Amino acid sequence: MSPGTRVATALAAVIVLNLPLGTVYAFSVFIRPFETELGLSRALLSFVFGLALICFTAGMNIAPLLYRAARPWLLVAGAASVTALGMALAAMASDIAPLALGYGVLFGLGGGTGFALLLQGMNLMLSRHRGLVNGIIVSLYPAGAMIGAPIFGIALGQWGLRATLAGLAATLAISGALAALLVAACGMTLAPPAEGPAAPMPERRASIFWRLWAIFFLAAAAGLTVLGQAAGMVEAYGGTQALALSATTGIAAFITAARIGGGWLSDRIPAAMVMAGAHLLALSGNLLLFVFPGPMMAVATLAMVGSGYGLISGSTAAAIGVYWGPNHYGRLAGRLYVAWCVAAITLPVLAGRLFDITGGYAMAVLIAGMGNLLGVAIAASLPRRATAPCGA
């Protein structure tokens, strides 16, 4: 198999595994069915969504410990099996505990582990277009939501909540098996070439890491609120259920394109500039929605907020390669995604609680806008290129 074919086969494995996992970003479609069938509050459902992202992040940080534990295809198959088991448990849930365990813990852990394994293996195979390829990889989650949301909407209407979740569990099992076969076929490896003891992270490089962490956190707090509650937010601003479902799909499409665009732009201009512009875009959207509330304005401005998050997600993925290089990609990505994890349990959960109290999202929108303003300032302080040899 030629190097180009190996890379294409590896990318196919990444796509096959992560598109179904990306349906986690279509969670807002399940909010009303869960409220009706299980009698859960919006805040509790926001907790389940946040728990899934926490466990996803934990899985990403567990993955580097497994690089040499077994063959890559076997590790991918194992991670996929955990996700399928979790979703099957969620399909049978009758209250919050099994739902949190299945959808939150198992689905999240398996998904994060599988994502990080393939992210590491893919980056070790790349020699160029690193920003673009990583932008494509991180775009797969909103792309999965974009595809999954309308399918879920139809399935929920035709067969109900439990059958829809059971169908998703079966899809996760099939996609995991296919991804494992593709990983085996391309000969993917996970462990970087043997190196000497890792040097401590230089003070300046540590400063870059924490600024990237903060930029990603602030963008993710707003973006995950949109992804997790888009349908509910559009309805809260006066939109119909049909508009809310369409908006969920459309917003996911914008985020998908923005993640690819963020990686592509970072191959051409400094990632710091992309991040600053992205936070400015999201800030504009939040301010417009706060000042001019309404259903169509909600759709347009939530797309702006989501696009800002997408651009930062893609450019952050590219920035890891710029500042640290490919050998440590999985490890650094896992650490940075802790910001995504913390974001998942802050503003999205707070937004759900504020909705339960006030019946609206105005305060959550204002808080998100303040975060975006801070993100612009931090992004402007980043160096435009790596300032020391990679290897932190």
Image (cartoon, rainbow, N blue to C red):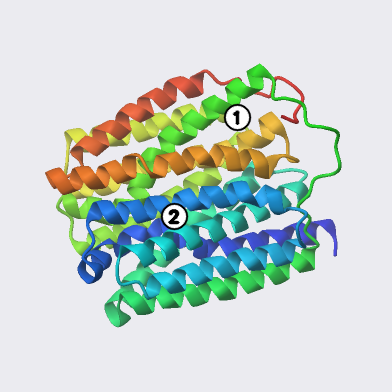
Label count reads 2
Q: Give the image location of residue 74, x and y in percent.
A: 72, 67
Q: Residue furthest front?
A: 97
Question: How far separated are the C-alphas under marks 2 and 1?
Answer: 34 Å
Q: Give the image location of residue 304, x and y in percent.
A: 35, 41
Q: Nearer the viewer, residue 66 or 297?
A: 66
Horizontal arrangement in the rendering, residue 391 relative to residue 384 (left or right) = right
Horizontal arrangement in the rendering, residue 83 relative to residue 355 (left or right) = right
Q: Amino acid at mark 2?
A: Ala
Quadrant holding the N terminus: bottom right
Residue at the image point whose x is 46% and y is 43% from the top: 341
Q: Nearer the viewer, residue 107 or 229?
A: 107
The vertical placement of 173 against 385, above or below, is: below
Return the residue at label 2.
Answer: 52
Q: Amino acid at mark 1?
A: Ile
Of callouts 2 and 1, the N-terminal one: 2
Horizontal arrangement in the rendering, residue 384 relative to residue 198 (left or right) = left
Residue at the image point whose x is 65% and y is 22% from the top: 205
Q: Give the image location of residue 98, x and y in percent.
A: 38, 67
Q: Give the image location of residue 373, x and y in percent.
A: 36, 25
When asked about the image quadrant of residue 192, the answer is top right
Residue at the image point whose x is 58% and y is 71% from the top: 175
For label 1, the crowd category at 10 Å Cα-Cα, with few meaning under 14, some 14 to 19 and many 20 or more, is few
Task: Kindly identify which numbered label has been placed on residue 269.
Answer: 1
Task: Kindly identify which numbered label has been placed on residue 217.
Answer: none
Q: Residue furthest bottom?
A: 159
Quadrant holding the C terminus: top right
Q: Are marks 2 and 1 in contact (CB under 8 Å)?
A: no
Q: Is residue 74 visible?
A: yes
Q: Is residue 145 visible?
A: no
Residue at the image point whose x is 51% and y is 40% from the top: 338
Closer to the camera: disc 2 or disc 1? 2
